[in-house]
Image (cartoon, rainbow, N blue to C red):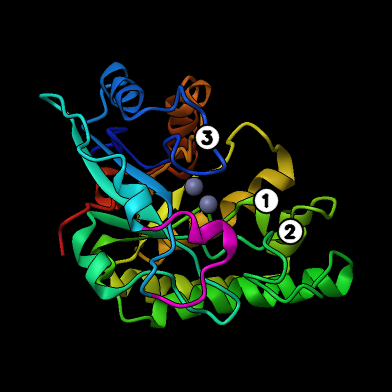
Amino acid sequence: MKPYVIDHDLHIHSQLSLCSSDPGQTTGRILEYAINNGLSTVCLTDHFWDPSVPGASGWYAAQDLDHIKEALPLPQAENVRFLFGCETEMDKYFTIGISDKTVDMLDFIIVPTTHLHMDGYTLDASVGYDGDGIKRRRELYIERFARLLSADLPFHKIGLAHLTCSLACHHAERGILRLLEGISDQTFSELFSSAAKKGLGIELNFDAFEYEGADKETVYRPYRIAKECGCKFYLGSDAHHPGEFERAVDNFREIVKTLGLCEEDKFRLGTR
Ligand SMILES: [Zn+2]
Ligand SMILES: [Zn+2]
């Protein structure tokens, strides 16, 4: 079996994302990253809430369709496909912030179910970081994943962003690790089996060098189960600044090696 080739990055922000606002993070710089690293596909995924879907927070309201379209036209190079996508959101009512019309228009849409740092918006403001708070975050982690799976979406162009992101529980010590530890293999298997059946892309995006020993395995466990369930994976750096491009490919390489991924495990955007 052919080893998984690192030839894409499908989660990249430009300066248009308010959490970047970095004048150096231009689409030209992103294209340069692709060329320098031999990536044949990159996708722009700025934060986005569709104005036609009620419920944008103030932060998202400023990141509407006109805003993300300011990146167009995307620069192209001979051997690089530079795609136009977005990172939308799921609010606390499990509403996903994108209309069918915009889904049709974009090349790729990623949905972060783990953005549980937006108190009052993606979860009730009363959910804290003590034992009960972590328990509630774990329940939401599972429910938000399940809600995405039951949404009426063309899953061949949908990705599930950063499943082991610390934002899900970022104020508690070892927060994301404690959250993940409490989810059974059985629960993950059910979620990932459904994801595999629907064709939802699973994003690989975490710092492969941050954890060691048992903690490292805690982060890898969901992805190992996803692989067993037949899920397909894509790489995403979630870069917001040019400096993050420097080690992105080394990080991808480490994750792919640790999971033992093959080309067959690759999510292929645009194939049903
Ligand atoms: Zn995100
Ligand atoms: Zn992102």
Horizontal arrangement in the rendering, residue 226 relative to residue 91 (left or right): left
Query: Which quarter of the rendered picture does the C terminus lie within?
Result: bottom left
Q: Check the image and report above or below for 261 versus 140.
A: above
Q: Is ligand 2 within 8 Å of the beta carbon of the residue shown at mark 3?
A: no
Between discs 3 and 1, the one toward the N terminus: 3
Q: What residue is disc 1 on?
A: 166
Residue 186 visible here: no
Image point (26%, 28%), residue name: 39
Horizontal arrangement in the rendering, residue 137 relative to residue 232 (left or right): right
Q: CA distance from mark 2 to mark 3?
A: 25 Å
Instruction: Tell me the element at label 1.
Output: helix
Q: Which amino acid does the dot numbered 2 rest on?
A: Cys
Instruction: Tell me the element at label 2.
Output: helix
How packed mark 1 is, by other alpha carbons closer than 10 Å (few <14, some 14-19, many 20 or more), is: many
Over which residues does the magenta segment extend? 53-64
Q: What residue is disc 3 on?
A: 21
Residue farthest to the left, as pictured: 78
Q: Position of residue 120 (x, y in %)?
A: 71, 71
**Marks 2 and 1 close (CB-CB < 8 Å):** yes
Horizontal arrangement in the rendering, residue 169 relative to residue 87 (left or right): right
Q: What residue is disc 2 on?
A: 169
Residue farthest to the right, as pictured: 130
